[in-house]
Image (cartoon, helix red, strand yellow):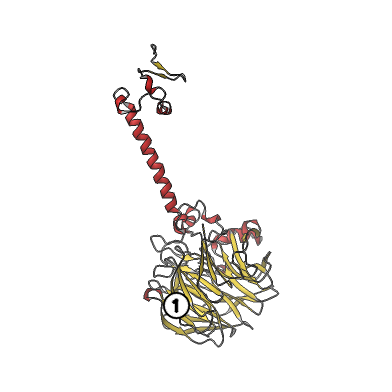
Amino acid sequence: MDERGTITEEGMIYPYPIPTQFLHNPYYHLLGIAATSTIHSSIFPAFTERMMNIQIMDLESRCSSLQSELDSTTPTSLLRRNQDPTSWLPRSPARHVLPSHRLPVTCVAFHPIFSSLASGSEDTTIKIWDWELGELERTVKGHTKAVLDVDYGGPRGGTLLASCSSDLTVKLWDPNDEYKNIRTLPGHDHSVSAVRFIPSGAAGMVPSSGNLLVSASRDRTLRIWDSTTGYCVKTIRGHVDWVRDVCPSEDGRWLISAGNDQTARLWDANSGDCRNTFIGHDHVIECCVVAPGTTYPHLSSMAGQKKPPPQSSSAEFIATGSRDKTIKLWDGRGTLIKTLVGHDNWVRGLVFHPGGKYLLSVADDKTIRCWDLAQEGKCVKVVDDAHAHFVSCVRWAPRMVKDGGVGGGGSGVGGGGGMNGLASNGVGGSGRRDDPGGGGGGGGAGPGPGNDIKATIRCVLATGSVDLNVRVFAS
């Protein structure tokens, strides 16, 4: 000890006298002080406080680690910390593999609000899953032949599940009453291939489902039904062969259909008139989808337009997938914009990313492909072996509902102006939808650009396959 204090062998200097037996205690050197017990706390009053601070920091670190583990337990919790949902793309492995069907899975659909996922199968059943937990909730029976499509929707305050089948019927089920079959809609003369609720609401808002639904059939027709009465209010004719798929525009004014006649057709849902026919595929068209308004900046650039249409305009662009292994992008007037080549087998399903930058496709080559619309439709990601067999269907989870009744379908936002600037009278989505009893929300303002859109996107995708499984891909 000199006038500066105690000097240790390592050259550390302490301003207090230190007993020799403590000089070699590692805690002195770790903390930069000379006391490690309460005996010396009176000599070194900061020591006890320093030790308590270290213990508090350690506990905070452990708490943060445990919270991180908790946050990673469900897809929804992961969404809260996803930095940029507009750029999220699915990747292997799937978060959940859901086995239970006894024959190939043909269709999937998300409930608008709750974490329910419906799947239909050739085994004649519909299964309801909790897609967050990966658990089977119930099996719904009623169809006598293969279930070919399912969709959630219906009037606000009364979400329904619609299904269609090779037994020639469309059925309505009530999720709020243990999925009781409340109505059967007969009328088609052959297998019913697809069913969708037709959106309705104010232009420019987030998609909201109404009372009407549309079905497509092997009898070459589309039929529009009133879900509250069960009556067929309109039959649309024009296709010359099996109609495989149908999709409404975001405002519910337009319908796009496609099928075995190798054409897609755009219909005025109110009048039933065919506005445009899309010719270019060399084989059966398996699927079609209307592009949401969020895609317009990218698709309009691909189409050579100087500026994109307003997002309030609907049915400006569509996409079709075919057994000729290609995907074609069109403008609403029937002009082919781009052919996307990459799949090695029939293209079975399409869905636009809600962020507007990507188009996702599934096919019988067992893959999911992600096409970047900002790069002229370049394939930027392939999820190989997404299933062990043909991938038959795909759906994107609806946007998260916020205060004010926001909801919506898997293909994004939009609605409003209608094609060619025609006034439109509602809002809708071209994917499966979510709603707490109210068909996608309706009434609340739709998400605007930037952070509002990002905040509503759920990074969850579901697929079904001939391998009998449903898979859920989540961030």
**In terms of secondary structure, where does tag 1 sit?**
strand
Residue 196 image point, x, y percent: 51, 75
Residue 364 appears at what percent x and percent y?
64, 70
Residue that protrudes farthest toward the top in the picture:
3
Q: Which of 201 and 220 is in front in this view?
A: 220
Residue lying at the far right in this picture: please name it: 282
- Image location of residue 462, percent across then percent down: 53, 66
Image quarter where the N terminus lies is top left
Q: What's the residue at 55%, 83% (across, down)?
A: 166
Residue on which disc 1 sits: 140
- At 58% from the left edge and 85% from the top edge, which residue is drawn? 219
Q: Which one is nearer the viewer's eye here, 339 or 128?
A: 128
Which residue type does callout 1 highlight?
Val
Identify which residue, 333 or 168, lies in the foreground.
Answer: 168
Please give the name of the residue rendered at 41% of the width and 73% of the height, measured from the top-left corner.
159
Give the quadrant of residue 183.
Answer: bottom left
Q: Is residue 348 above or below residue 406?
A: below
